[in-house]
Image (spheres, rainbow, N blue to C red):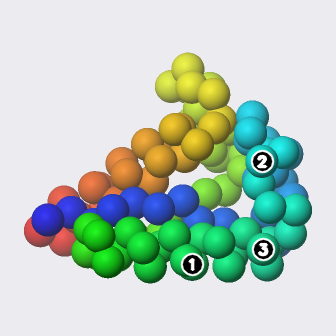
Amino acid sequence: MPPVGFPWYEAGTYPAIRAVMSDGEDFPPTYGEWLSEAEREKRRLERRYGPVHCVFIEPEAFAAWCRVNDLRADAAARMMFAEKAALRLYRKSA
């Protein structure tokens, strides 16, 4: 079974991530707060679905991917991006 893809960010790019996302104002104000929430959600997903693959999202590359795919840089696009990345990794390792 393929792992669940989960969007993940690095501390150094977190302000840029918030700026590039159309829903960035909904993100926790600090990376530490985001990380606590993300780790809790990751554990919840692992209990429910099994392996979870954290997909690091770079702000500029993600914004470009959204433009190419005619998507808003929002939660739905982040999940799609992470799921596609996890599926590619799964297929390579299968």
Q: Secondary structure at mark 3?
A: helix
Specify which label sits upstream in the sequence, 1 or 3.
3
Q: Residues within 10 Å of mark 1 (few under 14, many from 20)?
A: few
In front of the other: 20 or 76: 76
Pointer 1 residue: 39
Measure the alpha-carbon separation of dots 1 and 2: 17 Å
Q: Amino acid at mark 2?
A: Asp
Q: Amino acid at mark 3?
A: Glu
Residue at image point 67% right, 56% down: 58
User: Which residue lies most toward the top here?
Assistant: 70
Give the crowd class for mark 2: few <14, some 14-19, many >=20 residues within 10 Å.
Answer: few
Task: Residue at 55%, 77% (x, y): give it.
Answer: 40
Q: Which mark is residue 26?
A: 2
Mark earlier in primary sequence (1, 2): 2
x 60%, y 71%: residue: 38
Residue type, mark 1 in image: Glu
Give whichever of discs 3 and 2 has the lower sequence position. Answer: 2
**How far apart are the alpha carbons under marks 3 and 2?**
12 Å
**Distance (Cα) linking label 1 and label 3:** 10 Å
**Secondary structure of the residue carrying numbered label 2:** helix
- Residue 34: give x, y in percent of width and height: 73, 69
> Where is residue 36 shown, x and y percent of the image?
68, 79
Residue 48 shows in this picture: yes
